[in-house]
Image: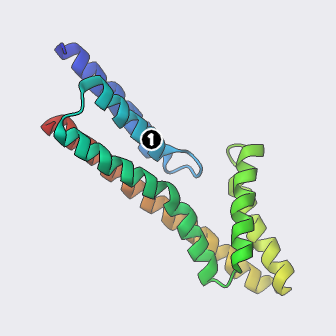
Amino acid sequence: MPDWLEWTTFGLVQLFMLVGLLGLLVPIFPGLVIMWLAALGYGVAVGFSTLGIVLFVLITLLMLFGSIVDNLMMGVGARQSGAAWLTIFVALAAGILGTILLPPIGGIIAAPLAILLLEYARLRDWKQAWRAFTGLTVGWGLSVVARFAIGALIMLLWWLWVWKG
C-alpha cells in the first residue's frame, strides 16, 4: 500500500474513531458501534495480521459489553433507589420507543419520565418516585463515563494495532 494511501486510511479511521468517542457523550448515539465499524474497515483495508485479529476480537467484546452497560447501570441505579423491576423494564421500553418516535431526545425524556410516573402510580409517594428517578439518572451518568472509558480503550487497542500490526 503506498504511503499516501496508508496515511489516508489512518486519517479516515482516526476521524471515525474520534467521532465515535465524542459521540459517547451523547446518550443514544451508537459511538461504540461506529468505532467498531471503523476498526473493521481498517482491518479490511490493511489486512488482519495475527495481532490484528486478536485486537479486533477484543475491540468486538468491548463494543458488545459497552453497548449494554448503560442499560445495566441505569437499571441498577433505579433498582437500588427502590424502583420495581417491572417499572425498570417499562422505562427501558419507553426509552427505546421514545428514541424511535422522537430522535434523538425522545428516549432521554421518556425513560426517566416513565420511572417517575410509574413509581408514583405504584407507591403514591412523590419522594420515593423521585428517588427512583434520581437513581436512574445517576446510573445513566455513570454509564456515560463507563462507555467513554471503554471507547478510549478501544481507540488505544486500535492504535496498538496500527503501530505494532
Does residue 18 appear anywhere in the picture? Answer: no
Image quadrant of residue 149? bottom left
Which secondary structure, mark 1? helix
Is 98 located above or below residue 35 in the figure? below
Q: Position of residue 47 (x, y in %)?
A: 24, 27
The one nearer the camera, 79 or 26, is 79
Q: Position of residue 93 (x, y in %)?
A: 72, 59
The amino acid at mark 1 is Gly
Does residue 45 appear anywhere in the picture? Answer: yes
Q: Position of residue 89 (x, y in %)?
A: 70, 68
Residue 132 as seen in the image, left or right of residue 164: right
Is disc 1 surrounded by few (<14), some (14 to 19) or many (20+) residues within 10 Å? many
Q: Residue furthest left?
A: 164
Q: Residue at x 65, y 75 (%)?
A: 134
Q: Residue at x 25, y 46 (%)?
A: 55
Q: Residue at x 45, y 46 (%)?
A: 32
Residue 160 as seen in the image, left or right of residue 76: left
Residue that numbered label 1 is attached to? 20
Q: Position of residue 24 (x, y in %)?
A: 48, 49
Q: How many marks?
A: 1
Q: Residue at x 68, y 56 (%)?
A: 108
